[in-house]
Image (cartoon, grey):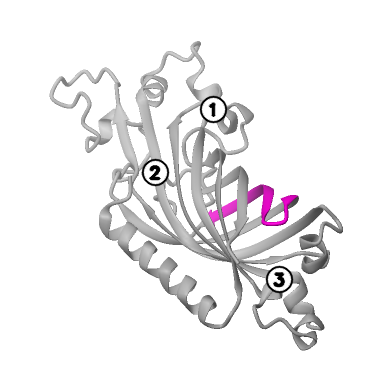
Amino acid sequence: MPNLKHLAIAFFLFLMTQSAHSQFGFSSELGIITGPVQFRSDYGSRSDSQTNMGNMGVGIGIIQYINFSYRKDYSYQFRDSYFIEHFKVRNEISWNRTELEHFGKWVDPSKTSEDAKRLRGHKGVAKNFDFGSQLEFYPYDIKGFESFTPKISPFVSLGVHYTFFSPEVSTTYDNPDPNAYGNVLDPSNFYSDWEPGSVNASSGGALSVVSSVGIRYKLGKLSDLMLDLRWQYYFSDWVDGLNHQLEYNKNNDWLLWLNVGYIFYLD
């Protein structure tokens, strides 16, 4: 879980955002999101469907929107603005967790080499505390959607987030050296072609780019249901605690997150 320092920083930024848009009279929306996460890491092969479906986790978050079209001093001048009627700013604090292991042909039960045993014994956990902002575009008029015409409104978004990651690594490889058993700092417990230092469960931070596509469904005058599919690419390959330099490891860590959310209009 994120430490108190990370929570304090994110909460302070959230309050500053809330205060700023309230001062300028914009409406606020608050919501909660949750759903399955598919973490694409260096465990297994990224293009392998068994790996991708096996390394699934869960995410949960709190989201807050700045809705420009819902100004308290709303006027025709603002209503005629394309940006006002088609864009919102989304601010978010979220957390996700995924248990990781190696899947695919290299760990098939028929494989009896020591490297296959090392891979089967290698496990990990990706834990990420995330905050940031996205700009969301709605092709349909936002005021029209708030008036139930239409009741469904699609959107796309793009933004930048910062992630505090704190991975975990473990191994159950039956090392011939009893002093090395379970030691994640000993390279002999991991795949022999990996360079020493490829496994590192140190905590850290990284920027990421976030893009999503989704829809909103109008439940009531002051509430929406949201379905959102996110792609998040980290500018680091240490988010999962593994960064080997083999040929197929050409990308940083990234994830897909399908979440469902409930959004309530505060103003």
**Among numbered discs 2 and 1, the one appearing first in the sequence:** 1
The amino acid pointed to by label 1 is: Gly
Report the span colored magenta. Answer: 219-233
Q: Is residue 79 visible?
A: yes
Asked whether disc 2 touches disc 1, contact meaning CB atoms under 8 Å apart, the reply is no
Residue 197 point in image, percent of width and height:
29, 46
Give the spatial CA distance, label 1 vs label 3.
36 Å
Residue at screen point 41% across, 48% down: 128
Dot label at residue 54: 1
The amino acid pointed to by label 2 is: Lys
Q: Is residue 226 magenta?
A: yes
Q: Quadrant of residue 137?
A: bottom right
Residue 195 lies, with reference to residue 204, above or below; the image says above
Asked whether disc 2 touches disc 3, contact meaning CB atoms under 8 Å apart, the reply is no
Q: Please rate how many residues cluster around mark 2, counting C-alpha atoms within 10 Å: few if below 14, some from 14 to 19, many from 20.
A: many
**Among numbered discs 2 and 3, the one appearing first in the sequence:** 3
Q: Is residue 94 left or right of residue 187?
A: right
Residue 110 point in image, percent of width and height:
50, 11
Dot label at residue 87: 3
